[in-house]
Image (spheres, rainbow, N blue to C red):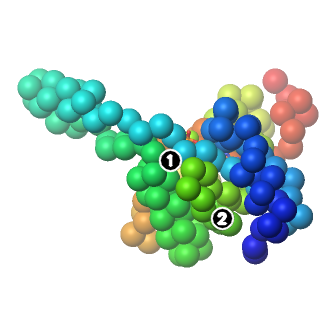
């Protein structure tokens, strides 16, 4: 699915994703999420943290590399495309630009909120997410930060309808 030149122009001009990093748009091709580039991170703090972790004999506390900027966007887009290519339910990447990229919008409820709001299906949804992770790893794929807040629940009822 290609976005129209008008939608791409409107997205490129927007302040929303520049100010807030993530912005949702209604386009002629449906709802999309736009993610702006994150500032490049300085490696010095990570080197310091990693040095301390090694000195303490706790190498597993070393930081995962988080470069920010273009490199981070390239990595994210490449992972999304690879995961989409093997049928994982990640958002399809629709457009990549210098300082932002556009993907399909998946929905509004993330699993973290669903669990915390005592949704009647919370345990089953949590289990489903765990099973999905196991299948993904078995297929030789991986996520970064595969946390509940980074998983969107498909078709969950709106929060006010859930019993507290
Ligand atoms: N494709 C998408 N569909 C629906 N919501 C999204 C999508 N991408 C991001 N979001 C929302 O924006 C939030 C931040 O996006 P995320 O990709 O997790 O950014 P970060 O890399 O800063 O963690 C997510 O927790 C989710 O609520
Ligand atoms: Mg996130």
Q: Quadrant of ligand 1?
A: top right
Q: Quadrant of residue 15?
A: top right
CA gap between label 1 and label 2 equals 23 Å
Please indicate whether residue 106 sits to the left or right of residue 52 in the image: right
Q: Circle 1 sits in a helix, a strand or a loop, which is it?
A: loop
Q: Nearer the viewer, mark 1 or mark 2?
A: 2
Q: Residue at the location (49% across, 53% down)? A: 73
Q: Which residue is mark 1?
A: 146
User: Residue 33, how many percent across, how many down?
Assistant: 72, 51
In terms of depth relative to the viewer, which is nearer, 105 or 35? 35
User: Residue 59, how many percent across, how many down?
Assistant: 17, 36
Q: Which residue is mark 2?
A: 95
Q: Is the residue 11 above or below the residue 94 in the image?
A: above
Q: Circle 2 sits in a helix, a strand or a loop, which is it?
A: strand
Q: Residue at the location (76% across, 52% down)? A: 11
Res 76 seen here = yes
Please indicate whether residue 57 sits to the left or right of residue 109 in the image: left
Q: Residue at the location (67% across, 32% down)? A: 19
**Mark 1 / mark 2, whichever is N-terminal:** 2
In terms of depth relative to the viewer, which is nearer, 103 or 144? 103
Mark number for residue 105?
none
């Amino acid at each position: 699915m290609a976005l129209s030149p008008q939608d791409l122009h409107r997205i490129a001009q927007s302040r929303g994703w520049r100010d807030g990093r993530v912005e949702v748009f209604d386009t002629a091709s449906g709802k999309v999420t736009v993610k702006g580039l994150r500032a490049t991170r300085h490696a010095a703090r990570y080197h310091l943290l990693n040095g301390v972790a090694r000195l303490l004999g706790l190498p597993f506390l070393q930081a995962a590399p988080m470069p920010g900027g273009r490199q981070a966007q390239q990595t994210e887009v490449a992972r999304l495309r690879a995961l989409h290519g093997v049928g994982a339910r990640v958002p399809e990447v629709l457009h990549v630009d210098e300082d932002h990229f556009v993907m399909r919008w998946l929905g509004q409820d993330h699993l973290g909120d669903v669990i915390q709001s005592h949704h009647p299906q919370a345990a089953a949804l949590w289990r489903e997410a765990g099973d999905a992770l196991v299948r993904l790893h078995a297929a030789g794929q991986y996520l970064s930060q595969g946390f509940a807040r980074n998983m969107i629940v498909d078709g969950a009822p709106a929060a006010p309808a859930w019993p507290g």
